[in-house]
Image (tube, helix red, strand yellow):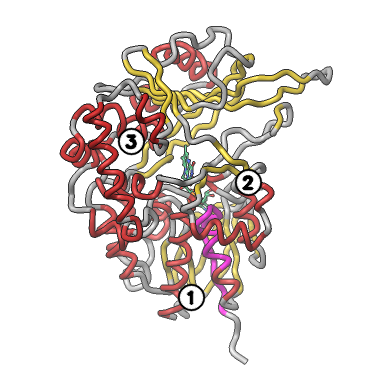
Amino acid sequence: MPRTRRVAVVGGGMSGCAAARELVMAGREVTIYEADDGLGGRARSWHRPEIEPDTGINLWFTTFYGELFERIKEYGLEHDMVEMRNSMVVVANGKPVNLVADEISTLVTYAHSGAWDKLRFLAASMALTAKRSKLDLFEPEQLAAFDNGTSAAEWARNTMGENAYQHLIRPMIESFWLWRCEEISQAHVMAMIANVVGSKFYVFGRGMETVAERMAGGAEVRLNTEVSELSVDGDNRIRITASDTDGGSVTDTFDEVVMATTAPVTAKLAASLPREIASPHLLRFAETQRYEPALSVSFLIDRGRMPSGEHIVPAGPGTRSVRSIITVPKTLITRDGRHIEKELTFVYLGREATRELIDAPEKVQYARALELAPALWPAFPKDAEPFHIVRRPVGLMWPEPGRYRRAAQLAREQRGPVVFAGDYLGCPTAEASMRTGIRAVNSLLATT
Ligand SMILES: Cc1cc2nc3c(=O)[nH]c(=O)nc-3n(C[C@H](O)[C@H](O)[C@H](O)COP(=O)(O)OP(=O)(O)OC[C@H]3O[C@@H](n4cnc5c(N)ncnc54)[C@H](O)[C@@H]3O)c2cc1C
C-alpha cells in the first residue's frame, strides 16, 4: 500500500485551516504549524471575562460569504451568529447624519449629499448589483476583468461626482478598510457595492476562531511553534525547522507544504527553496505586498453618553485624524458582582497617528486616542476608561490597482509540492482567505 503523503500547513489562520480541512478530506496526513497560542490568526477575537458577551470586537461576516456559510451549516454554528446593524453615523463639518447604505429611506434623508449625487450613487449601485454574478469580491479571477489600473477614487469621481465620492464612498470604504480610495483598485469597491445591497451582517458570539478550530479537525495542530526555516533534503522532501516556546528547535520532513502566513513571512521563509519548488513569481509578488497597520484602542463608557451600537465615521475631503469610532453595548460585571451597562467604544486613529503609535506604550496609545477622538465626536467623554488594545502591525493588505489581475494570474500558476495561501492572494476577508486555502490545495492535488 502506498504511504500516506504528509503535508505541513504553515500558519493556522483562516486560509491555513481551510487548506487543512481540504487536505484531510483528500486523505493526507496534515500538520498545522502555528506560532501563536491558538488558531484563527488575524480573525481571532479577544476575550475579557468581566464583560458580557466576553469577546471584544469581532470579525464581521455577511450573507455573501459563501464558503463560510457552508462551514457554519456543516458545523451547526447558526446559533452562534449575532446579527449586526449595518448603520453608520456620518459626520461632516461637525454634523452627524444617520445612514444605512442600502436603505433608500435613510439615503433620501442623508443631508451630506444633494439629490443629484444620491441619484448618481443609486444608479451606479443598481448597475453594479445587476452585475453581481460577475463581481465576486473573493475571486480575483473575476475581479481581474475590472482591475484595469483605475483607482477606486478615480472610478467614483467619474461615475458619481466629487461630492458623492467624498460623502458616500469614502466613509463607506476608508473607515472600515483603513486604506485610502486613491490607493486601491476600483474592482474592490465595485465588488463591495455590487454585493452589499440586501446583505445581512453578523459576528460570531464566541469569535471567528470557532470556525478555524473546527476546520482544523483531523489535522495535528502544533501551537506555539514558529517555523524558522524550510529546506529540501536529498529525497526532494521538504524539511521544516520550527522553534517552540521553550526555546527548543524541532525538525520534521514532509512531502508537501502549504504556506499560509502573511506575505512578508512567506517571502522570507520560502526564499531559500529552489525555484522549481517555490514559484519565484509568487515570491516576488509576496515581497511587494503592502499592509495597513491596525491599532484598535478601546474604552468603557457609561451607556447613554455615546450613540449605542454605531459606527461613527467621518466624511468630506482631507485626511482623517480619526477613521472611525465603533460602539458596542456590553454589560460590565464588577468584582462585587454588580452589572453595569456600558458602551465598549473602539477608536481607530488615522493613518499617520496609527503608524506613529503602533509600537508606542499602551499608556501613550490611550492618551493619544483620548486626545484625538473629539476631532470626530466632540462629545467623546474625557473620562472614558481605558480597557483593551489590539495592535496588528501587519493588518489589512492593500488591493492596489492591478493586484487582483496579478493575483489571478499567480493562482493559475500554482504548482505543488509547495503552494501558497493567504488573504494577499485574494482580499483581506475571512472568506477570501478560506478560498485561497482551498484553491492552493486544489492546485497541490492537481500537480502531485
Ligand atoms: C483590523 C482588522 C479587521 C478586520 N476585519 C475583518 C472583518 O470584519 N471581516 C472579515 O472577513 N475580515 C476582516 N479582516 C481580515 C481578516 O482578518 C484576514 O483577511 C484573515 O483573517 C487573514 O487570514 P490568513 O489566514 O490569510 O492570514 P492570518 O490570519 O495572518 O494567518 C497567518 C497565521 O500564520 C501564523 N504565523 C505567522 N508566522 C508564522 C511562522 N513563522 N510559523 C508558524 N505560524 C506562523 C500567524 O500567527 C497566523 O495565525 C480584518 C483584518 C484586520 C487586521
Q: Nearer the viewer, residue 434 or 203?
A: 203
Q: Is residue 405 above or below residue 323?
A: below
Callout 1 secondary element: loop
- x, y percentage for residue 377? 44, 14
Mark 3 C-beta closer than 8 Å to ligand 1: no
Look at the numbered discs 1 and 2 and tell me whether their residues touch, using CB distance below 8 Å. no
Question: Residue, x 53% and y 19% (percent of image)?
Answer: 307
Is 7 a magenta residue? yes
Q: Which residue is mark 1?
A: 237
Mark 2 closeness class: few <14, some 14–19, many ≥20 residues within 10 Å: some
Of tags 1 and 2, the one toward the viewer is 2
- Is residue 101 in sight in this rendering? yes
Report how far apart the C-alphas of labels 2 and 3 lie in the structure: 28 Å
Q: Which residue is mark 3?
A: 179
Q: Amino acid at mark 1?
A: Arg
Q: Earlier in the sequence, mark 1 or mark 2?
A: 2
Q: Earlier in the sequence, mark 3 or mark 1?
A: 3
Q: Nearer the viewer, residue 9 or 64?
A: 64
In the image, 117: left or right of 219? left
Q: Is residue 103 above or below residue 195?
A: above
What residue range appears in magenta? 5-21
Question: Residue, x 50% and y 29% (percent of image)?
Answer: 296
